[in-house]
Image: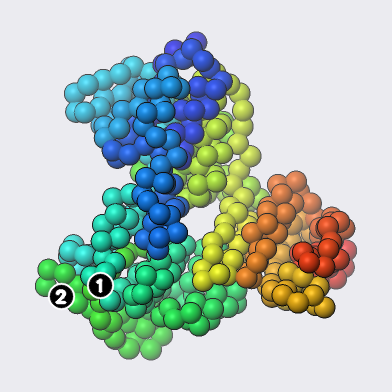
Amino acid sequence: MVEQIVVVGCGAAGATAAMQARKLNRKVEITVFNTEPYSQYSRCGLPYTISGKVREFDDLVLTPPENWAGLKIDAKLATTVNDVDSKAKTVTYSDSESMEYDALVIATGAENADPPIKGLDKERVYGLRTMDDAKVLATEIGKSKKAVVIGGGLIGMEAAEAFHEKGLDVTVVEFLPNILLAMIDPDMAALVEEHCKEHGLEIVTNTAAQEILGDSSPEAVRVQNRETNNVTDIPVDFVVVATGVRPVTDLAEKAGAEIGRTRGIVTDNRMMTSVPDIYACGDCAENPEFITRMPSVSGLGTIAVRQARVAGMNAAGGDVTFPGIVGAKVTKLFGMEIASTGLTGATADGYGVEVTKGSIKGSSKPPYYVGGKDLKVKTYFDKATAKLVGGQIIGLEDAAMRINVITLGIQHDIDVADLFDFENCYAPAICDTWDPIVTSADAARRRLKR
């Protein structure tokens, strides 16, 4: 019988696991450890504290520290777990104190993965992963004029938008040929880049940041175009490095848990690791991708809380499963919604899935209704089975809700004919009789001859 649960980490995954364990089991003792001094907060909201769309940093705190006592959960903030002894079933924290557990949930998240760039140790070179990172970055507003963001992924682009909205000249330096390539295809990314540039953001792609120049703090970022080899120095007051993250697995490794090909902690459909009674969830956990069942680490808050629900309930004596990672993503840049789910063209190639796509230009409303916004829609189908495996939508309105429909379709194993037969609602002020995702399915259906 489970009497003591220990959760390491109090982000989206750790906090959710603890609360779900408490909901299932009212008697079990639960202790949560967090290295940061903060209780659960929204990491995804950090860029918006810089722009002012989130008014106060405290507004990001989802579970105030005083709430844990009401849940009868002992939250030990600013406390680091140093070691795990999986045979004795103990954790060691604050260097010398220890605690026994019957079930352990590891939710240690991820940390910034710094690229091989000279000068990263200078002052005013930042990451954007924690509350403290965002607080320091916010101090740059008012004393800086120029910023360089290295990395054109989700966090990099959201940070770049935030600083631009505060009046700074911002340049995004992306190593790959386009921004957001982990999310959307190159042709879709090119449309997003054009939109961002129209709003005043500088973006240089296919370009390697080589060195941050200056004495103690940045004066310029030296970059080299990967195609022409031309070297340029971009003047700067401060730098944000947003080149991705890596799972934090030190404790799991000490416990003897298997680390997978993604460098995340291998978990099964109950979110259990290779070590009995030890679970892992969130950004540190590797779990199968939904369509191909290949190992994947998502880095998404939506996945973290869903994995954590499963880990927490099972740690408390339940028996629930996690279905796998579809990977639905969305962001909004200068009013444009960018949404994707499932496989992209590149990931389909990487997994060896031959796909057929339906790609169309549509509108959020009928052509006769004033105010409709352009939508670019792609849907992907497995060429062999015609099953829906992915989708991408960009536009100034209604992209996110449509991508949710595609995600649900993937999870329920629908094919191209099913999506074409989807009965969408209709009213001229809201949407057309044939929704753009249905039209994209029709384009793919004709190619697949289904």
Instruction: Specify whether residue 286 is in view.
Output: yes
Residue 153 position by quadrant = bottom left
Instruction: Name the residue carrying label 1.
Output: 144
In x, y percent, where is residue 29? Answer: 42, 16
Residue at 44% across, 12% down: 3
Q: Is residue 390 left or right of residue 421?
A: left
Q: Residue at x 71, y 49 (%)?
A: 408
**Amino acid type of the residue that numbered disc 2 sits on in the rendered structure:** Gly
Structural distance between the alpha carbons of marks 2 and 1: 16 Å
Q: Position of residue 117 (x, y in %)?
A: 26, 68
Q: Amino acid at mark 1?
A: Ser
Q: Quick one: 263 or 95, which is closer to the camera?
A: 95
The residue closer to the viewer here, 252 or 378, is 378
Number of numbered discs visible in the structure rendering: 2
- Residue 85 disc label: none
Q: Looking at the image, which residue is at 74% across and 51% down? A: 409
The C terminus lies in which quarter of the figure?
bottom right
- Left or right? Give the position of 234 relative to 198: left
In the image shown, does 126 or 369 lie closer to the viewer?
Answer: 369
Q: Is residue 279 left or right of residue 210?
A: right
Q: Residue at x 58, y 66 (%)?
A: 338
Q: Position of residue 33 (x, y in %)?
A: 33, 30
Residue named by callout 2: 214
N-terminal-most mark, 2 or 1: 1
Is disc 1 surrounded by few (<14), some (14 to 19) or many (20+) residues within 10 Å? some
Q: Position of residue 256 (x, y in %)?
A: 37, 31
